[in-house]
Amino acid sequence: MPEIEPYPLIFDPILMPKVWGGRRLQRYAKPMPPIASIGESWEIADLEVTSASGGGGGAARSVVSNGSMAGDSLHEVIEQWGTLLLGERLLRSERIKQEQGMPAFPLLIKYLDAREHLSVQVHPSIEYADEHAEAHLKTESWYIVEAEGDSVIYKGLREGVTPLDLKSAIESGTVPSVLRAVPAVVGECHTLPSGTVHALGAGVLVAEVQTPSDTTFRLYDWTNEYDRPERELHIAQALECADFGPPIRAGTLSPDTDRGVVAETEFYRIIEARLTGAKEPVNIHDAPVVAMCISGDGHALIEDPDGRFDTVALSRGQTALIPAALSGYSTVRGDKGDMVLLLSEPLPG
């Protein structure tokens, strides 16, 4: 068997038409079909089952588009590369879901383009998930890439709102009145743990990093505002899972730094790096790292023990997965001018 030589992986995006989607992802190197409103571009996915088709959908697994593994799925790469891709600590973690005897990649990476408001929803609380085997926690972070005019995101419930208030708002169709509307500011990163009532607002485009769960309880769907067909609401589950405390404050880089952590949860860490070719490159930890190029152009540079470099080009909208076997001596350099990267590292727990 030939020796495995891991390298930075690029994947074909999985595009999801959505009633609330738009056309802006075309500016981020996505192969947009004519006319269709695309709401999501799944950059890295390794899900055996999805709810994309209304529940019980098929697998969604990213396919490699570069190098010797081109045409293979991420799951097949994990099967062949194992520790070289995930690293020892992550591979041994009890958190990593096993599918068909192999671990699944523990993050789901997306772009979301909201031409209209997304449904107001909540994901299972810890207590709910403990009591329902089919329900899975879902923590997600939204890094705001674009925001039109006075666009907002809905993040948590207004101070003083009680479970009775929320139930009444659901029944009367006035849920927006009890939500916290937060201005959408480019460069801010909003983390939404399971239990947070939330909705992405119209006019906002985000890069999303999340745990790979599809368990969602919908409590408002803007049917009157957008003349949408009615979909099922999950009122009892939403009321049981909703968190009535204040949401987590947005993470953002301070004006006097060019890199730093903008989100840290028990599941993942996100670093934002603003690079220029002349600046020192970003050194990446000994773990698999997802590099999303938010703007600009550059390269992921891989230096092997003999001092030789391999490179993978990154331009706006492209995402690369740098295997754990390389990340200890990898750098990401904005060698074509200014470049903004999000570097997401799954944590073993």
Image (cartoon, helix red, strand yellow):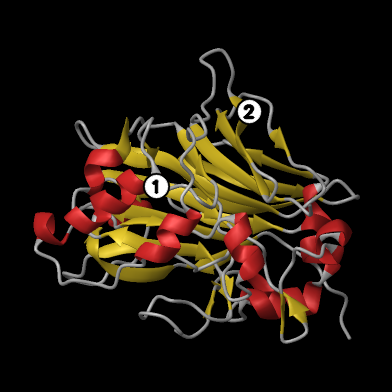
**Disc 1 to disc 2, how far (Cα)?**
37 Å
Q: Residues within 10 Å of mark 2 (few under 14, many from 20)?
A: some
1 and 2 marks in contact (CB < 8 Å): no
Horizontal arrangement in the rendering, residue 296 relative to residue 23 (left or right): right
The residue positioned 80% from the left and 73% from the top of the image is 81
Horizontal arrangement in the rendering, residue 218 relative to residue 313 (left or right): left
Figure quadrant of the N terminus = bottom right
Q: Is residue 59 above or below residue 28?
A: below
The residue positioned 82% from the left and 45% from the top of the image is 329
User: Toward the viewer: 29 or 223?
Assistant: 223
The kind of secondary structure element at disc 2 is strand
Q: Is residue 337 visible?
A: no
Q: Is residue 230 above or below residue 192?
A: below
User: Toward the viewer: 118 or 3?
Assistant: 118
**Amino acid type at image mark 1:** Pro
Residue 37, image x and y in percent? 22, 65
User: Toward the viewer: 249 or 306?
Assistant: 249
The kind of secondary structure element at disc 1 is helix
Residue 193, image x and y in percent? 55, 47
Horizontal arrangement in the rendering, residue 200 relative to residue 125 (left or right): left
Q: Residues within 10 Å of mark 1 (few under 14, many from 20)?
A: some
Q: Which mark, by number, is residue 163? A: 1
The residue positioned 83% from the left and 65% from the top of the image is 91
> Which residue does the numbered mark 2 point to in the structure image?
260
Residue 201, image x and y in percent? 27, 45
User: Toward the viewer: 308 or 98?
Assistant: 98
- Earlier in the chain: of badge 1 and badge 2, it is 1
Q: Which mark, by number, is residue 115? A: none
